[in-house]
Amino acid sequence: MSSQYLTLYKMIVLYMLKRSDVPLSKSQIYDFILEKEYTNFLTLQEVFSELASQSLISEKTMANRTYLEITDEGAQTLEFFGNRINPSIRQQVDEYMEANSIRIRNEAAIQGNYRKTGENEYLVHLTAIENGQSILELKIPVPTEEMAQKMMDEWKVKNQDIYQYLFSQLL
C-alpha cells in the first residue's frame, strides 16, 4: 500500500474525529469508510494502529466498543496535511456526520459495560453523559453474565425513562 494512500486514510479518520463533538467508535468510522469503498478493513486496521502509535488519536474501550478521540497532536497534523483530503471527500464526511449526528451522539452518551467480580457475580456499570459530563452512573451487581448483558441492552433503549423516573422519585 502506498504511503500516500495511508496518509489520506489517516487524514480522513482525523477529519471525522475533528468534526465530531463526541468520541467516535471504530465501527462508526468503519461504516463510513467501507460504505464509500475508500479502502478495506485490514488497511483501516493499520490506519488505526498507526494513528494510535503516533499519538494522533486516543482509544478507550467500553462494552466491547473502542472509541477514538483526536489528540492535540492529531489536530495539528490535520492542520498541516488536511489539504490532502479531496473537497468531495470532505463534503461526504460532513454529510455523513450531519445525517448521523443524533445516532453518533446517543451511542457515545449512553454507555454500559460489565465485569466479573466473583464466582457468580458481575458488576454492571451504566452511564449517561451530557456535554462531556456524567449525569448519571449506576453500578449494579447481578448473578449472571446474561443478566448483565440484558441490562446493558435495556439501558440503551430505556435510559431516558430510567433517568426521568429516578429524577421524579428523588424530587
Image (cartoon, rainbow, N blue to C red):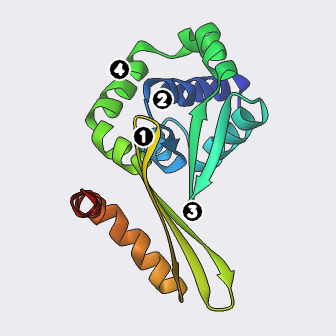
Task: Categorize mark 1 by other alpha carbons within 10 Å: few (<14), some (14-19), many (20+).
Answer: some
In the structure shown, which secondary structural element does the residue marked by tag 3 occupy? loop
Whole-number angstrom distance, CA of label 3 to CA of label 4: 30 Å
In the structure shown, which secondary structural element does the residue marked by tag 1 occupy? helix
Q: Residue at (72%, 41%) from the top-left corner?
A: 49
130 is higher (above) or lower (below) than 149: above
Q: Residue at (34%, 71%) from the top-left corner?
A: 154
Look at mark 4 in the image and give the residue it sits on. Answer: 91
Q: Which mark is residue 58?
A: none
Whole-number angstrom distance, CA of label 2 to CA of label 4: 11 Å
Whole-number angstrom distance, CA of label 3 to CA of label 2: 21 Å
Q: Earlier in the sequence, mark 3 or mark 2?
A: 2
Counting labels gives 4
Look at mark 1 in the image and give the residue it sits on. Answer: 32
Quarter of the figure with the N terminus: top right
Look at mark 3 in the image and give the residue it sits on. Answer: 64
Observer-side mark, 3 or 4, equals 3
Task: Categorize mark 2 by other alpha carbons within 10 Å: few (<14), some (14-19), many (20+).
Answer: many
Whole-number angstrom distance, CA of label 1 to CA of label 3: 20 Å
Observer-side mark, 3 or 2, equals 3
The residue closer to the viewer here, 124 or 63, is 124
Quarter of the figure with the C terminus: bottom left
Q: For the residue marked with disc 2, what is the amino acid?
A: Met
Q: For the residue marked with disc 3, what is the amino acid?
A: Asn
In the structure shown, which secondary structural element does the residue marked by tag 2 occupy? helix
